[in-house]
Amino acid sequence: MPSKGYSVGESVMVKWPGSALWYPAMILSIEDDEYKVRFEEGTEDEVTAESIRSAASFRRRSQSKSPSRRRSRSRSPARSPSRQRVSRSPGRKTPAKTKTIISQSKSETKVQLTPTRSKRLLATRSTTEVHTYTTRSSTKSGHQILEPVVDIKTGKVPKTVHYEFGGPFGAFFIMVSLPLFIYYLYFACSKEECSLQLWPAHTCDWRDYFDLEAALLFLGWMGLQAFFYLLPIGSVVKGLPLRNGQRLDYKLNGFFSFILTLILFGGLLYKKYPVAMVYDKFLPLLTTAFIFSIVLSIFLYIKARRAPGHALAPSGNSGNFLYDFFMGHELNPRIGNFDFKVFCELRPGLIGWVMIDLAFVVKVWTDFPENPPWALLLVTFFQMLYVADSLLFEHAILSTMDIIHDGFGFMLVFGDLVWVPFTYTLQARYLADRPSLAVMPDYCLVIVLAFGLIGYYIFRASNSQKNAFRENPYASQFASANVLITASGKRLLVSGWWGWVRHPNYLGDILLALSWSMCCGFGSIIPYFYPIYMLVLLVHRERRDSDHCRQKYGNVWNKYCAQVPYRIIPYVY
Ligand code: NDP
């Protein structure tokens, strides 16, 4: 064990929990496998043996004169100093790696946390950094094959060797079929009819698909949201450490942009500007958004080709043009402080979704002022709540898979700008197309409201619980929580929502989605497309996330899964 021989008062190097960075620290106390340490700038923390190295091993490394030679050493944090030269080949198994696993499994500890004075100061740590490269480990039956996240020799993100979404063929299929599917949904669920048909009635006149007014409206919308994003309002926070140790600054003013947009919408309405035109221009707006997403994806791919190797996305660096174009070649494409991914993820598409809903409400209520469209109002309320929630908790996106793992390519661009605003508005469009439809008695809508609020509560409470735990696992609310400590020192919560089911937040999301569709009654399956799609998406996402967590946490993740066997829908699978 690398920990053997450490004593209280000794100066060592300690890996900052949850990151790949090592800092000088002093051991304050030792209890079983828990080391209380104090970093140089005063932060105290508790870590396991795997997060400690002797200071001498780092000094040896920094004496190396050639930067490339320095990089060429394997820096698996979990490996003992004496074996750090053993293997440089990603994926090659060595006895040292096997030993890592054994020591890791020994560190699996179920503890009762007590509040400590420890504070997370990740954002301010900049001095005496010793950058190391984390390792990923894919686990088969508990055995690991370690794989550096940054190529040890070149300092670049290594080639993507594991394809997702069916590889280049799957990527091509998705890129062709999803846009076709959105047009299919538009025509299959029209004013006249809303049912699954093989070949729904559709127009062949290109002017129905594209017009200049809609194109200018869309571009104006993108420009407006970009302008709000760039306003010097809102807080600037640091993202999670990147592979080279750098932490990007992110401007968080999404909720402010949302409020400004709502005020602007109200102003336009007051001035009798025909906001309901969005209803009539839905098809050309969709086409413009689609063309825009292709152009933006091409631009991002070209930009990524010029990006430094460490800035590429681990999931979109296969060398296959189609696949990388789809997955996103660069992780965080930016021009200056303008972060394309964070901007597109939360603003034009999400806020646009609510604006489309509101335009539909205006259209129906103007046409039938004596008859408030309660079901449409309820859908709009739910979806506004959902979007406002995402923007209010905007900081949470910085630790999502989309930001830290996925590149920004066609998959996310199309999803953010086309898929979200033009399919998630399906229930509202269904109701706007049928203003006189008595979906259900009004009192039934109250039941739907209650159902949706329960879904939202599960969604919000579980997300907040995890966020609070990630921010400070020592907070008093987790004092008696069951926790698993991983080899990196990061903890997994096995109590509360996260001890009941894996990804309770996904469960809440699905219930909420179902409530939106229930507002449309039970006359057609098509308005239920969204909850069905969410179920498929989140089941798939849960599996992807579970694979990532297994890579990050190895056997401790397996142990978590054993203790919390239920996934998304409890007791079903
Ligand atoms: P989560 O917010 O659930 O984050 C998953 C991460 O949480 C894991 O990678 C792990 O990261 C951490 N984690 C998992 N289990 C535990 C545990 N027991 N204790 C502590 N940490 C744990 O996933 P997403 O980013 O996918 O989703 C965020 C929200 O967005 C969800 O509410 C989801 O429903 C919603 N969503 C909505 C979509 C839509 O289209 N409407 C699409 C996708 C998501 P680590 O250990 O590194 O912290």
Image (tube, rainbow, N blue to C red):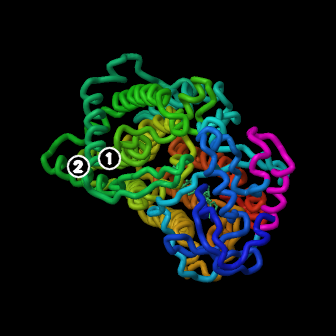
Would you say 274 lies left or right of 252 here? left
Tell me the amino acid under the disc marked 2.
Phe
- The magenta stretch is 83-108
Q: Secondary structure at mark 2?
A: helix
In this orientation, which residue lies closer to the viewer: 175 or 480? 480
Label 1, residues with CA under 10 Å away: few <14, some 14-19, many ≥20:
many
**Residue 317, position in %: x, y?**
60, 32
- Kindly identify which residue carries mark 2: 265
Asked where in the image residue 198 lies, by quadrant, the reply is top right
Asked where in the image residue 495 lies, by quadrant, the reply is bottom right
**Residue 551, position in %: x, y?**
71, 51
Q: Residue at x 65, y 67 (%)?
A: 12
Label 2, residues with CA under 10 Å away: few <14, some 14-19, many ≥20:
some
Would you say 313 lies left or right of 333 here? right
Quadrant of the rendering where the C terminus is positioned: bottom right
Tell me the amino acid under the disc marked 1.
Met
Q: Secondary structure at mark 1?
A: helix
Q: Earlier in the sequence, mark 1 or mark 2?
A: 2
In this orientation, which residue lies closer to the viewer: 137 or 389? 137
Would you say 253 lies left or right of 447 here? left
Quadrant of the rendering where the N terminus is positioned: bottom right
In this orientation, which residue lies closer to the viewer: 104 or 231? 104
**Residue 381, position in %: x, y?**
38, 58
- Kindly identify which residue carries mark 1: 355
Q: Disc 1 versus disc 2: distance between alpha carbons?
A: 8 Å
**Residue 72, position in %: x, y?**
67, 40
Image vertical order of residue 367 relative to residue 6, above or below:
above
